[in-house]
Image (cartoon, grey):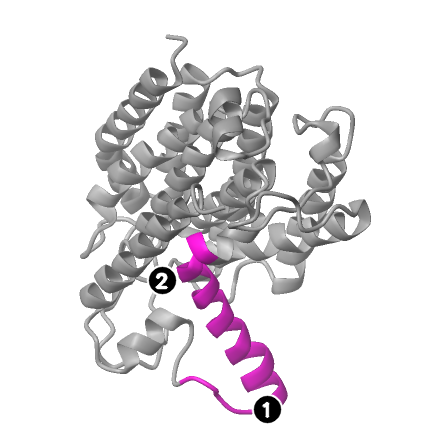
Amino acid sequence: FNYISFRSIGAALTSIIIVLFSARFFISYFHKKQFLDFARETGIPSASDKSGTPTMGGIMIAIAFVFSSLLWASPANPFVILTLVSFSYYSILGYMDDKAKLKARSGEGGFSEKLKLILQGLYSLAFVAFIFSSYSPIPESERANLYAPFFKFPVLTSFLVYGVFVFFYFIAVSNSVNITDGLDGLAIVPSTFVVSVLGVFAYIIGNSLQAKYLQFPHYPGAGELTILASCFAGAAVGFLWYNAYPAQIFMGDTGSLAIGGMIATLSVLLKQELLFPLLGGLFVAEAFTSQVQDKIGVNFLGRRIFHRAPLHHELQYRGLAENKVVVRLWIISGILALLAIATIKIR
């Protein structure tokens, strides 16, 4: 039971079983409580109607992830604690947003963008303060270091600049998954790729021999994050069983915000923030097209820059069927994950 590899397998299987065997209950319960998605106007004639599908399925992911993590990982490990706190905070935030939307029966009825950013910003600020404190699991000499793919040494060592960077990075990454979650199964598979690759990095960084051989900094205890990555991967596979096209349940903000918060946390704790534009390239593209369309196109220029945004809706508008859009973006995300793994050795 001391081997990370064995516990990772057990963690993944536990999460899969929990989601697979609880899904039918939650789907039925959400139908009964009318926790159902509502019609949205996308401006895409071929888009399928998602109204009436249960949402807030992220609750299943959260239960499986947290339970399996506490069962198989070390609950006293500060890396584990911090990741679970981030995941839980964003999951609760997403749940409250989902509930507000369901009450208003509108995608605009949830938290305002300003309120959501304030709540995310408060946590991000607390997170930055914690990783710079004496309680941080990151070695003191490493806390202000920012590493880039392909480089052995940090490209930034300023506490002030790094702190500001992490503050905005956390908000951006956590929202990028939320923006991507717009088609059946679209967000869950790339999320699994990203978290799984970060799990590989966690294993290396947490192992003194592997870290020395591959020229990574060594953070004692970081290897436990590999188990958390496996917990999530298992929960994600179980969820995909019911979320694949045509979806029987959606994760909602309850799931997408929690996943984004977890990815941001893992990236910062493992000092792989600058790997995300490559590893999570799909999320970056989705968030970029959405923000450019809204902030620059509609708000500043008074017109659309893209036919539709984010990226997956643009592809639909160009005539690709929903399931084809999803699978092709999965493929792209998988390729990016492989390229990210290659950076382990190419340094």
Within the magenta stretch, is there residue 297?
Answer: yes
In-front residue for pair 269/61: 269
Residue 250 seen in the figure: no
- Give the structural element (helix, strand or loop) at label 1: helix
Q: Residue furthest bottom?
A: 302
| Residue 218 locus on image (x, y percent) | 58, 27
Which residue in the structure is indicated by mark 2? 182
Residue position marked by numbered label 1 in the rendering: 301
Tag 2: amino acid: Gly
Please give left or right for residue 142 compared with residue 220 in the image: right
- State the count of labels: 2
Q: Residue at x 68, y 46 (%)?
A: 124
| Relative image position of residue 340 (x, y in whole percent) | 41, 49
| Position of 314 relative to 223 (above/below) | below
Mark before the other along the chain sequence, 2 or 1: 2
Q: Which secondary structure dominates the residues rendered in magenta?
A: helix
Q: Residues within 10 Å of mark 2 (few under 14, many from 20)?
A: some
Q: Give the magenta range.
A: 278-306
**Crowdedness of circle 1 by 10 Å Cα count: few (<14), some, many (20+)?**
few
Q: Is residue 295 found inside the magenta-colored segment of the image?
A: yes
Where is 332 relative to 120, above or below? below
Give residue 280's position: percent from left, percent from top.
44, 54
Q: SS for tag 2?
A: loop
Of 302 and 345, nearer the camera is: 345
Residue in the picture at 61% in, 22% down: 78
Instruction: Place residue 12 in its image quadrant.
Output: top left
Question: Residue 193 lies in what quarter of the image?
Answer: top left
Vertical comparison of 340 with 314: above or below: above
Query: In this image, 201 relative to 155: left or right?
Result: left
Question: Which image quadrant: the N terminus?
Answer: top left
**Residue 171, horizontal then vertical, whole percent:** 61, 54
